Amino acid sequence: MQASVADLIPLSALQHMLYCPRQCALIHIEQMWSENRFTAEGRVLHAATSETGSETRRGVRVVKAMPLVSRRLGVSGIADLVEMQKDAEDCWRPFPVEYKRGKPKSHRADEVQICAQGMALEEMFAVQIPEGAIFYGETRRRIIVPLDDSLRQLTMETAAAAGALLTGGVTPPPNYEPRKCNGCSLLDACQPRRLSRNQTASSWLERQIAQG
């Protein structure tokens, strides 16, 4: 029996999962959220695309807040913005655009999120989507993200791990990484320095993927 949309995990959980499995669990299992300067800036940036609707700009149909579903990945969510362009065969081809505050990261969590959106759009429109884009508020630039085989594989593995985490309902122990933790809005709730048990988030994620 095919799962209902209500049974699918939030698409945003993939970004949280790859960044930090404990953060993913705190948000999506324990329903914790706290805002800091970074999340506030991100909320303001997303406000421009939060209302559903569409318009045409220079022959490109721009759709805001488009609902997405991927049963292959087991996720559902909302795309910030999807640009619809007609290809050589006069068919509409979607191009997902995700808005992020800050600048490009050293990790691939943002790329996984846009890849999941692209894969969902492929299912919905029955077309191939070779790339998407991430707009970063700090640099005010779009970064084109090729949806290549390695990124798609990482996205599928992350979706499987996130699904297992949310289904299992167990929050993993923290591992204090200053570069990640000090900017996280859930720092006080997580208490990674006090509760850390010398288990890295990456090793925990690898085990979850292997078990899945």
Image: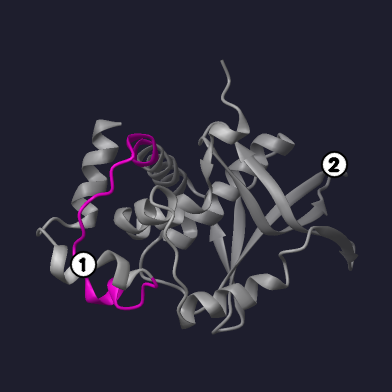
Q: Residue at x 30, y 31 (%)?
A: 212
- Number of numbered discs visible in the structure rendering: 2
Please indicate whether residue 128 sits to the left or right of residue 64 in the image: left
Which tag, 1 or 2, sits closer to the chain's start? Answer: 2
Give the SS element for disc 1: helix
> Where does label 2 land, which residue?
89
Where does the N terminus fall, quadrant-wise? top right
Is 46 magenta? The answer is no
Is 178 magenta? The answer is yes
Residue furthest to the left? 198
The 10 Å Cα crowd at callout 2, few under 14, some 14 to 19, many 20 or more, is few
Please indicate whether residue 63 sits to the left or right of residue 112 in the image: right
Between 45 and 193, the one lying in front of the other is: 193
Tell me how far mark 1 sits from mark 2, CA to CA.
53 Å
Q: In the rendered structure, find residue 192 and report the number of the disc placed on it.
A: 1
Specify the segment rendered in magenta: 164-185
Residue 50 coordinates in the image, percent (x, y): 71, 64
Residue 29 visible in rendering: yes
